[in-house]
Amino acid sequence: MIVGIIPARFASTRLMGKPLADIGGKPLIQHTYESASRSKLIKKIIIAVDDEKVEEVCRGFGAEVVLTSKDFETGSDRIANVVKNMEEAEAVVNIQGDEPFISGIMIDQAIEPLLFDKSVNIATLVKRIEYVKELKSPDVVKVVFDYNNYAMYFSRAVIPFVRDVSSKAIAIEKTEYYKHIGLYVYRRDSLLKFTKIKPTDLEKTEKLEQLRMLENGFKIKVVVTNIESIGVDTPKDLKRARAYYHWLQGRKEK
């Protein structure tokens, strides 16, 4: 069985109470849950929360919810706690709680490598960067991968560095840059093994937990998607998400 877990942390450092932020009359976490429910491959979705108020809201719109400790450092730790006794969960999808418009197609794209290749234990999504603003932003995580689509490195810096160009605008025309979309699919055993390992030096430096995987020899299969998503990390992102929601509603009314 493929299980989707949505970790939702109330005390976000950049946007307090983020799971309950209103977007078009619904809390952000409900949008994420409903979007994830459009996956054709996930058989069960659970929201892993760290706050009783969030738990109450999630149960109110019909979600299956697990209340977890506030002490978990990462979303991966939180979902591992949920699935550690779920032996029926062959694969686990970590769906970020702050992705209100994540596409079911995107989720299924990330799952497929584990269905068709037994050697793949972890998969994630990337999308080509189209704008210089994204390329420069440290909030947009960049990734480079090999010819077999396995991740080589993730960074908040611009990678790869294009030496013989005078600007990022020229670089983006000459080189394919990719941003990481923080959705992971794990075989359950790999998730449990990974979350038992202590944070590593590179992880602490870049504040990216996927570097712990690479430093410890885990291979991460990269799936390139053409579908865009809007993550909500800051008040500015929330404003953008609200505008996008209203734009979607306007399209439906036409």
Image (spheres, rainbow, N blue to C red):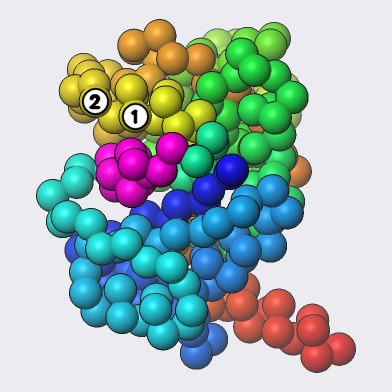
The stretch of residues the image draws in magenta is 76-87
Asked where in the image residue 83 lies, by quadrant, the reply is: top left
Residue in the picture at 21% in, 69% down: 51
The residue positioned 25% from the left and 63% from the top of the image is: 67
Look at the image and tell me in which quarter the C terminus lies: bottom right
Is residue 65 shown above or below 53? above
Callout 1: helix, strand or loop?
helix
What residue did someone put label 2 on? 196
The answer to whether mark 1 and mark 2 are in CB contact below 8 A is yes
The disc at residue 202 is none
Q: Point out the image quarter for the N terminus.
A: top right
Residue 220 appears in the rendering: yes
Look at the numbered disc 2 and give the secondary structure of its residue. Answer: loop
Label 1 and label 2: CA atoms lie apart by 7 Å
Q: Which label sits on residue 192?
A: 1
Q: Amino acid at mark 2?
A: Lys
**77, 90: nearer the viewer:** 90
The dominant secondary structure in magenta is helix
Whether 84 is among the magenta residues is yes
